[in-house]
């Protein structure tokens, strides 16, 4: 099973029996083919608006389109983000699970068990998680270090639609992930698409997005709790 296949199962709520060492190789080696394009004023303005959010919460519906399956695997749940580095993804069905990020530590669990890992030791996993986290945090400098960046202003009306294109620049992530696309309308997140090099694709649709979510100290402690390993 590929490292990204492991992540697909992880985000569906299963804790797979796979050696995480396959994702632990250096992801920093080698120079990018060309400098990342992330200097567009529209992109900078958009990320600045995300960076000023007090927090975010949203519902999601996710479809995993795998070459081995005729029908996509579908899951539903909620996403929470407290800037700059805390994120919770809670799957409610078909199987309850959670994935929580705090600083550089990631925990994931389901009825089968719970595991934690240090993202700095697993750059392949970090490449997937950091794409959405850094966009929501408005951290353009860090995005430029990890991804080749493109930006499309799809609609310049009163409620403009946009899409950010991210391509990993380094190592295993570059070989496994063809592209990550994050789309939205105005200052609202609407969609996340991850296309793997093997053609498998995961599409997440967001709804009920609250970009003014303020978390209490109690919520910060409980929602983004990392169990002891």
Image (cartoon, rainbow, N blue to C red):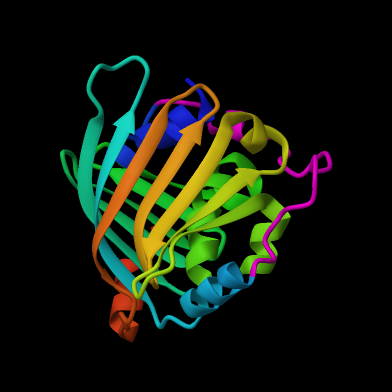
Left or right of residue 7, residue 98 in this image: left
Q: Is residue 21 magenta?
A: yes
Instruction: Work out whether residue 92 can be spotted.
Output: yes
In the image, 213 versus 39, the foreground residue is: 39
Residue 223, image x and y in percent? 31, 68
Q: From this view, report whether residue 139 is shown above or below residue 217.
A: above
Q: Is residue 204 magenta?
A: no
Q: Residue at x 54, y 33 (%)?
A: 20
What span is colored magenta in the figure? 17-40
In the image, 78 versus 177, the foreground residue is: 177
Left or right of residue 203, residue 46 in this image: right
Q: From this view, report whether residue 53 is shown above or below residue 64.
A: below
Instruction: Work out whether residue 122 can be spotted.
Output: no
**Looking at the magenta stretch, what is its main secondary structure?**
loop
* Residue 10, quarter of picture: top left
Q: Residue at x 32, y 47 (%)?
A: 204
Residue 117, image x and y in percent? 52, 48
């Amino acid at each position: 099973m590929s490292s990204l296949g492991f992540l697909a199962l992880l985000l569906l709520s299963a804790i797979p029996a796979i050696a995480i060492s396959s994702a632990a190789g250096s992801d920093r080696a080698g120079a990018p083919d060309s400098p990342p394009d992330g200097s567009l004023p529209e992109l900078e303005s958009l990320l600045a608006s995300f960076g000023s959010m007090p927090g975010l919460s949203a519902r999601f519906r996710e479809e995993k389109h795998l070459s081995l399956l005729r029908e996509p695997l579908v899951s539903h749940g909620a996403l929470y983000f407290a800037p700059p580095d805390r994120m919770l993804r809670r799957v409610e069905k078909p199987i309850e699970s959670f994935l929580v990020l705090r600083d550089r530590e990631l925990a994931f669990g389901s009825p089968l068990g719970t595991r934690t890992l240090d993202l700095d030791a697993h750059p392949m996993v970090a490449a997937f998680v950091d794409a959405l986290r850094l966009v929501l945090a408005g951290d353009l400098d860090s995005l430029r270090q990890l991804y080749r960046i493109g930006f499309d202003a799809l609609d310049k009306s009163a409620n403009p639609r946009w899409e950010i294109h991210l391509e990993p620049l380094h190592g295993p992530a570059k070989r496994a992930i063809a592209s990550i696309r994050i789309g939205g309308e105005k200052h609202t997140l609407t969609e996340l698409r991850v296309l793997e090099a093997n053609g498998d694709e995961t599409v997440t649709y967001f709804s009920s997005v609250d970009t003014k979510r303020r978390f209490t100290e109690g919520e910060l402690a409980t929602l983004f709790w990392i169990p002891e390993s």
